[in-house]
Amino acid sequence: MTGSRTINSVDEMRDFAREMYKYIKPGDVIALNGELGAGKTLFVKAFCKAAGYDGSSSPTFAIVNSYPGEYTIYHFDFYRIKKSSELLDIGIEEYLADGDAVSFIEWAELFADVLPQRRIEISIKVIGETSREVSVEQK
Ligand SMILES: Nc1ncnc2c1ncn2[C@@H]1O[C@H](COP(=O)(O)OP(=O)(O)OP(=O)(O)O)[C@@H](O)[C@H]1O
Ligand SMILES: [Mg+2]
């Protein structure tokens, strides 16, 4: 599951999210990195669909969205955060320590100091209009 792969279309990104659904377990924290429009939100939505959740939205205007289901999914976006105290104030550490939930964090690298040491890092690099280089690392 770890390593790099090339993804050539949105459909292949959805296939990748379905594969990751088999691998990711409650308690996992997934740091998602990659430029604007790389496909971080699309990946989380596809993951939620694979996990049987319907209607997940992007957390652009909230720091975190949570989706109930087989396990709770927390979906963070750090893009608009200005300082880590905003995250500590909402109790980020408690969210990320929740052993019954899976957390996805878009733009995680912006505040790497609040992330647990043990996490899965997914980096998405745009290499063409619909092609992406995706790397998965277990830290
Ligand atoms: N292979 C691909 N994987 C993912 N998205 C793709 C792919 N090819 C094209 N796209 C398009 O790229 C866009 C990805 O948008 P998305 O909102 O998921 O990016 P993001 O990384 O969350 O950006 P942001 O940093 O703004 O939150 C979508 O419009 C999607 O249709
Ligand atoms: Mg996004």
Image: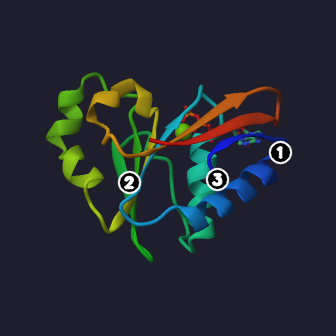
* Image-quadrant location for residue 128: top right
State whether label 1 is within 8 Å of ligand 1.
yes
Residue 139 tag number: none
Residue 51 point in image, percent of width and height: 56, 71
Residue 69 point in image, percent of width and height: 43, 75
Specify the amino acid type for callout 3. Met
Q: On the picture, is 13 further left or further right than 97?
A: right
Specify the amino acid type for callout 1. Ser
State whether label 2 is within 8 Å of ligand 2.
no
Crowdedness near tag 2: few (<14), some (14–19) or many (≥20) residues, C-alpha within 10 Å:
some
Q: On the picture, is 125 further left or further right than 6?
A: left
Specify the amino acid type for callout 2. Asn
Residue 133 point in image, percent of width and height: 73, 34
Q: Label 1 near label 2: C-beta < 8 Å?
A: no
Pointer 3: what residue? 1
Q: On the picture, is 20 further left or further right than 70?
A: right
Ligand 1, by image quadrant, is top right
Q: From the image, which quarter does the C terminus lie in?
A: top left
The local secondary structure at tag 1 comes to loop
* Dot 3 or dot 1, earlier in sequence: 3
Q: Residue at x 24, y 45 (%)?
A: 92
Pointer 1: what residue? 9
Residue 65 tag number: 2
Q: CA distance from mark 3 to mark 1?
A: 19 Å
